[in-house]
Image (spheres, rainbow, N blue to C red):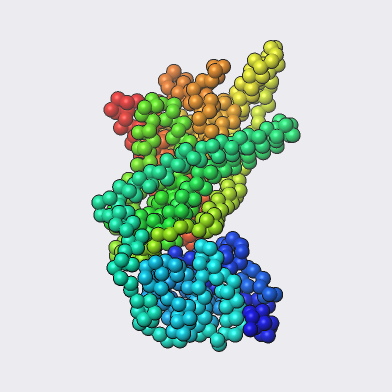
Amino acid sequence: MTASAVAAGRGLERATAVLVGRQNAGKTSLLMHLTGRTQKPVNFPGSSVERGESEVVVDGTRLRVVDLPGVGSLTPLSPDEEVAVGYLHGGADHADDRPDVVCAVIDASKLAVELTLVAQLAALPVPVVVALNKLDVAQKAGRAVTAEALTEALGVPVVVTNALTGRGAGALRNALLDAAADPGAARVKPFDPRAVAATLAPEGGEAASRSLTDRLDDVLIHRVFGLPILLLVMFGVFQALFTVASPFMDLVDAGQGAVQDVVRDLIAPGALQSFLVDGLINGIGSVVVFLPQIALLMLLVALLEGSGYMARAAFLLDRPLSRVGLSGRSFVPLVSAFACAVPAVMATRIIDNERDRIATIVVAPLMSCSARLPVYALLIGAFFPAAYGGVVLLAMYLIGIVVAAVVALILRRSVLRGPQSSLMMELPVYQRPSWRVVGGQVWAGCRDFLVLAGTVIFAASVVIWLLSYYPRPEAIHATYEAQRAAVVTEGPAAEAALAHVDALEKGAYLEQSFLADIGRFVHPVFAPAGWDWRTSVGVLAAFPARELVIPTLGVLYSLGDVDPGDFTVDEMGDADTEGHEGLRERLANARHPDGTRVFGPLVAVSVMVFFALCSQCMGTLATIRRETRSWRWPVFTFTYMTVLAWIAAVAVFQIGRALGFG
């Protein structure tokens, strides 16, 4: 009898199947093959933990497939596992959303371990179907097993699948619908996992046991060569971020400029045009310009994770990280934070020890993310010789890493005191990543980032624009209107002169704005770090998002709009061929009323250290609130990072000046 016949006979119109299995078992790839669609992430009720979902109609029955976070047993160890197991048991939070059938996705090459989970599923009040995945890996290792023999041993349907190619997806759909329509026909009978594995898939000979994974691990997790190889891999990842992503960032930048030009042509100068161009497009565009770097990092991390190497990285770094109170599982979130702290904080869900997880969350923002890079590039290019630029840039990244280690150690020995966690994980076999899964992970990360840019950054940009645009004294307009009227030349020279007057007028308005008043009010706080009021305003503008500092400084120094992602063009380089000053040169030449320099190498380092340590990202704080389900940790993160950044910036300037570097 076909699945459609069974479904029709039982009156089954809808069915929910849930995929259960360990990490790297192939659940996510299998979901895509079962439904032909990319999974849609959905939060569990009352939780920030996500599950993947997708639907397909099979012979008139709507089959919804749910991909749970990886679980090794029904005894949860991490927040993800706790929510997933609660869903399987049908707790109060899931009373209206219970599965009709459980699909246990198991790795055939690790049968003894995988069958332990299947044996525990016998306690659930729902039918079970087993998807036997990675049978080709088991065969190469000399541990082949047949679906028929396993079906007889377990008492439930077993379907051979291949998560990479999609083999067996149709048969598995039918088996799931059969079980959902006739629950009594798919109940796990009691069995001994190790005895079944030993009988059906005995260990092969020595030659068979020395698989490709074993031979690669002899080198990649070698006690001497393992860490240097890992460092080379990470260097390649970061190098790619600054080379491969650059052309795509230029395209985004060009698109933003084109949109701004269209808006300027369609809307007359005034408050509405300024709001759209300077507030919305420039504010959101200054964040979106980093999307190529974030997408590339997520792609590379997904490839490393899908291949099985990321688990080896966690294993290699477990001992060094344990010395500061973390574990090897903290490695993936901390690496992700170099692109953006938002997905990094979300990635801490893989950490089972709650104290380790919280410690990782609150130190992840100390990693220098892509948003800090334009600030570093601007100030290093303005105040340091090119030969020393790389050293200074590396120092900024190292400051965050070192401080993160110290903060994590202090937290784990004080407010997060507890037993030292140990890393217990099973290293997956090396395999070819599924491009559909990798693409889904990259898209999900980019979507989350764009949602952030369209919500938090949108709101922050509106607030910053309002504070920087108003009030609009008529006297300023009259003064610069007279200067425009005095321009009597024609052609390019006149256009350049008028653009210069417009930039001066914009800077004059900003000096009289509410934002400038706030900057002057808080300036005494930042004066010990050697900053002038304009730098204080730029830092205030950057608290919602670090990227906003460069457009603000561009306006304050009468350059008009400066795109923070465009840190290699004339506006941020030296004077152009027509002798116009760029932002770097304008900063280098800025003077106080008494003739002393506003900026210098020491002040530049002070500002960069502040940006390296300060929490200036509303999106990160909002994500910490969502992941911890408490305001305690985002408030703590913002407070300690801001205070630490101020102390470090003041210390750099005051000590440097005392040593004669002012």
**Which residue reaches farthest top?**
488
* Viewer-side residue, 60 vs 70: 60
Percent across and percent down for residue 130 are: 49, 76
Residue drawn at 37 percent across, 83 percent down: 192
Q: Is residue 79 visible?
A: no
Q: Which quadrant would the N terminus be assigned to in this image?
A: bottom right
Question: How many callouts does the rendering have?
Answer: 0
Answer above or below: position of 189 versus 202.
below
Answer above or below: position of 267 versus 180.
above
Residue drawn at 50 percent across, 78 percent down: 158
Residue drawn at 50 percent across, 85 percent down: 187
Q: Which quadrant would the C terminus be assigned to in this image?
A: top left
* Viewer-side residue, 630 vs 187: 187
Percent across and percent down for residue 560 are: 59, 28
**Which residue reaches farthest left?**
224
Q: In the figure, is residue 227 to the left or right of 613?
A: left
Percent across and percent down for residue 608 are: 41, 36
Q: Is residue 60 visible?
A: yes
Percent across and percent down for residue 484 are: 68, 18
Q: In the figure, is residue 208 to the left or right of 303?
A: left
